[in-house]
Image (tube, coloured by chain):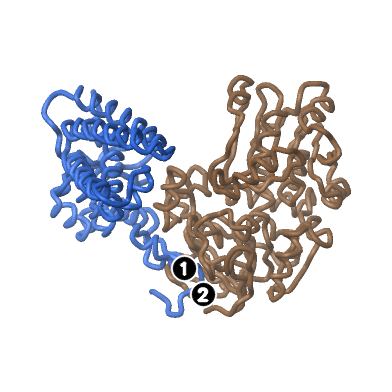
Amino acid sequence: MAVQVRVRDKDPVARFLGWFSIGLGTAQLTAPRALCTLVGAETRGAAPKVMRVLGARELAHGTGILARPRPTAWLWSRVAGDALDLALLGVTAAKYGRARTLFAIANVVAVAISDIQEARFLSRRKGPTRPAMQVRKAITINRVSDEVEQAWAAATELRRKVEQNGASVSFARAPGGRGTEVIVEFEWNPPAGDFGAAALKLTGRDLATQLSDDLRRFKQEVETGEVVRSDGTPDGHLLADHLRQRAARPLEEAVR
Amino acid sequence: MKATCWMGRNKVEVENVPDPKILSARDAIVRITSTAICGSDLHLVNGYVPTMKRGDIMGHEFMGEVVEKGPGVTNLEVGDRVVVPFPIACGACWACENELYSLCENSNPNARLAEKLFGFPAAGIFGYSHLTGGFAGGQAEYVRVPFADVGPIKIEDGVPDESVLFLSDILPTGYMGAEFCEIKGGDVIAVWGAGPVGQFAAASAKMLGADRVILIDRFDYRLRIASENIDVETLDYEDVDSVPEALKELTGGRGPDACIDAVGLEAHCHHPVYAYDRTKQALRLETDRPFALREAIMSCRNGGIVSVIGVYGGFVDKFPMGAVMNRGITIKSGQCHVQRYMEPLLERILGGEIDPSFVVTHRLPLEEATRGYDLFKSKKDDCLKVVLTP
């Protein structure tokens, strides 16, 4: 039986190339002269203008790759872009003969190889595209299933969050007397693909992250009777709070 | 109250901080009577363990008197004298039920941080960075002890603090390191590092029936303290041109049956490779300098065991995996499951089999913690172990 968890068309290489396009395009648009210097072109005249146009093209590549679930055509568009870049750099090299231009050509060749490999990899994918990813968050609680299901029924806030997001929950007996697996599953299809995913993660509204925290706290409450607090994390486990920890020393006011 | 605080790299200060309060039903507040500086505290001070915050209270080796307890703590009374184990463990999860206390699944409220670095999180630890939970440590006048019904062990009056204080960490850690070696009669055990943990690992290896124990360090006073108190052979690695070769020749060409790394990520070695690893570490291209570990692997006999109780934090380079695989070496490691060893080791102490206080070289008031750290870190005044008293 093939595993259906976290299966998706777009792999980390495509995602990396997408963000690479966004980064390069932004640099070309906002600092065209610096980029011209970098590749050994003139910083006056037409060159910076061309650089800006190329930047806009890069942003288009990046947006397409990141937003689409299976961006095969967008990867081929990057390959075409690489060919154009190499042609322009070739002209620049012939005209000025600067070492920096040769270095830029070497870099474009390196990334072009990745682009071609990835475009061919995605071209081999058959069947309908899969825009949504099946995400599963599971935790094992060292208690029999009756007890866990009762506690779940009592955890109204967590249950409501799961329902509102169209997620489903199931319970399974863990093998070898290891307790009960609590499994929450949902379809993950953020708006605008990887852009939406990144925005949700950065703002702490990513459902998978939230569920990781919630399930951990749920496990703590069922197994130990309390949410574990420390001086650095007085409110218990929350990923969003990890980044703004207080020092590990007692609070002025006790949290009871 | 007064507390020893991490104020930045290489900066430890005694500060006035608020007293701890009960936060959960299973908490207790302990008034510290003795607390020690651990070698692993130096990794924090030197900045090799990430996620320290300015103002963190340090210290994970401590004992004292219960002065307050939550309603969930039924096995302790106010006034009880207790030693507190350094890993915080809930006692209810699968790991705790299987006596893997330092892998408690619930006690680390910053589990996600640890998960990102290690794949899965480990237990919370007192005063040991935010990766292990951000718990205030015990180099202070008072400390809050979570899950006080699981960890602390009661100590009768009349037993001096110094004889039992090290049940909190280094004695069980050394003992577990020796236990990993599955010692049988006739075994030769080599131990890298004659700090307190290495000394206890060596002593434990003897207690567990090793035929010979060879302890390796470069500080004469440490090797001297060891040979005065434990039945060990000592090897100054700066006096020999190759530790693996020396060990091979000392063991009839077989190599030690098991090797214990009680050094960890800030190892030194007298070899050009030191410059290579030190540079990579300074540039953050690797986080840990694994000389002792590499030597332990290269020295160990075919099919032997390498026991790693020295602390590692991240990634190492040039790890001799080929030697491990082709020579059938088993590596065992872990933060000590202290709760598992406290009772049996307390019995050995009370029975006179071992008195761990022999490692103590300096006794200072808590106010002088900064000086204590300096003595210990710089190995000044033949410092092996500093005990602080509030």
Residue A85: numbered disc: none
Q: Quadrant of the N terminus of chain B?
A: bottom right
Locate residue B287 relative to residue B96 in the image: left or right.
right
Number of the front mark, 1 or 2: 1
Name the residue at the left extreme.
A128
What amino acid type is highlighted by mark number 2? Pro
Residue B110: image x %, image y %? 42, 57
- The brown one among the chains is B
Label 1 secondary element:
loop
Q: Are marks 1 and 2 in contact (CB under 8 Å)?
A: yes
Give the letter of the chain under mark 2. Answer: B
- The blue one among the chains is A
Residue A18: image x %, image y %? 26, 41
Front in this rendered view, residue B366 or B175: B366
Front in this rendered view, residue A243 or A105: A105
Give the letter of the chain under mark 1. Answer: A
